[in-house]
């Protein structure tokens, strides 16, 4: 039997304020946001180079089974490898910032193995090789937080926006698609304020968390991806790896 999505999200979001669940690999509760105050003139508010996977910043929460997250070196760069086989867990980091001020989110990722049978519109196929979640302070209970779910899809066209198969509070935004870039690093830059307004029709409230996930619990398959170089900034920032032929900015 598959885990009910509401319960999984409840545990994940509860951990942003208290140790209500007991996730794998957790060493300390995320009682306060793991984010330092930015200097007044600083463009970059928060950066994660993934030279290590710090338990002080990241909390792993099981959804159904687990995804294996590990700090590794690939292509000469430090990153996090996410390997999933018939399971899913999410890496969460608590934050607290206004996306009207710090509106740009940048990251790099690489997918080596897509999810066979992916069908994001349906509960039984709602897996993706690589996802980056942004959660907003949208009121309600912990599992009722609105979020943007940026996805590398196996086949949906880039630019597709649709409701999660589990809840309209989660909007899937396809920012990479298909097999043509498998095994290559891609860099993505998104404007959080604009994406939230287009998805939900109103101004964005504060961001409260970011999550990374590779999941195969719905399809029972497997997937392999890597994540690197997350940044939150006031302005668009130069890509860290300008040789990346797949750099995409919006």
Image (cartoon, rainbow, N blue to C red):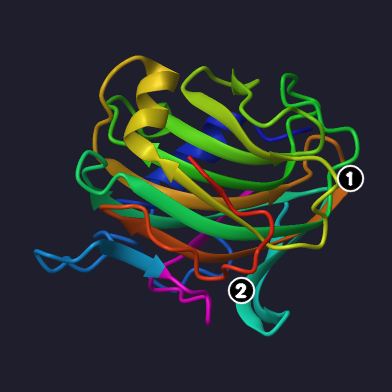
Q: Position of residue 3 (x, y in %)?
A: 68, 35
The CA distance from mark 2 to mark 1 is: 23 Å
Q: Which mark is residue 79?
A: 2
Badge 1 element = loop
Q: Position of residue 140 (x, y in %)?
A: 30, 24
Name the residue nearer the viewer: 61 or 165: 165
- Most common SS among magenta residues: loop
Left or right: 50 as drawn, with respect to 238: right
Left or right: 173 as drawn, with respect to 203: right
Q: Position of residue 21 (x, y in %)?
A: 47, 52
Q: Residue 52 colored magenta?
A: yes
Left or right: 120 as drawn, with respect to 237: right
Q: Which mark is residue 240?
A: none
Report whether residue 7 is seen. Answer: yes
Q: Residue 154 falls in which quadrant of the image?
A: top right
| Label 1 crowd (10 A; few <14 / some 14-19 / many >=20) | some
Name the residue nearer the viewer: 20 or 206: 206
Q: Residue 184 falls in which quadrant of the image?
A: bottom right
At a point 24% along the width and 62% down the height, the residue shown is 43
Label 2 or label 1, whichever lies nearer to me, is 2
At a point 65% along the width and 64% down the height, the residue shown is 244
Report whether residue 64 is seen. Answer: no
Q: Position of residue 142 (x, y in %)?
A: 37, 35
Q: Which comes sooner in the sequence, label 2 or label 1? A: 2
At a point 44% along the width and 33% down the height, the residue shown is 147
**Residue span colored magenta:** 48-63
Q: Which residue is mark 1?
A: 221
Badge 2 element = strand
């Amino acid at each position: 039997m598959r885990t009910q999505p509401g319960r999984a999200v409840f545990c994940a979001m509860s951990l942003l304020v208290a140790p209500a669940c007991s996730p794998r690999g957790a060493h300390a509760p995320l009682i306060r946001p793991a984010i330092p105050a930015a200097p007044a003139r600083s463009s970059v508010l928060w950066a994660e180079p993934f030279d290590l996977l710090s338990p002080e910043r990241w909390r792993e929460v099981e959804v159904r089974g687990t995804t294996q997250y590990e700090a590794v070196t690939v292509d000469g760069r430090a990153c996090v490898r996410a390997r999933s086989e018939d399971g899913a867990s999410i890496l969460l980091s608590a934050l607290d910032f206004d996306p009207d001020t710090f509106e740009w989110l940048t990251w790099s990722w690489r997918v080596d193995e897509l999810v066979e049978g992916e069908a994001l519109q349906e509960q039984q196929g709602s897996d993706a090789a690589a996802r980056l979640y942004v959660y907003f302070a949208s009121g309600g209970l912990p599992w009722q937080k609105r979020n943007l779910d940026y996805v590398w899809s196996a086949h949906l066209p880039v630019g597709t926006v649709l409701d999660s198969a589990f809840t309209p509070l989660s909007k899937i935004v396809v920012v990479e698609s298909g097999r043509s870039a498998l095994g290559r690093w891609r860099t993505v830059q998104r404007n959080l304020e604009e994406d939230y307004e287009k998805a939900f029709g109103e101004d964005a409230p504060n961001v409260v968390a970011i999550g990374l996930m590779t999941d195969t619990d719905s399809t029972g398959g497997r997937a392999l991806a890597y994540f690197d170089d997350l940044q939150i900034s006031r302005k668009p920032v130069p890509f860290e790896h300008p040789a990346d032929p797949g750099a995409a900015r919006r």
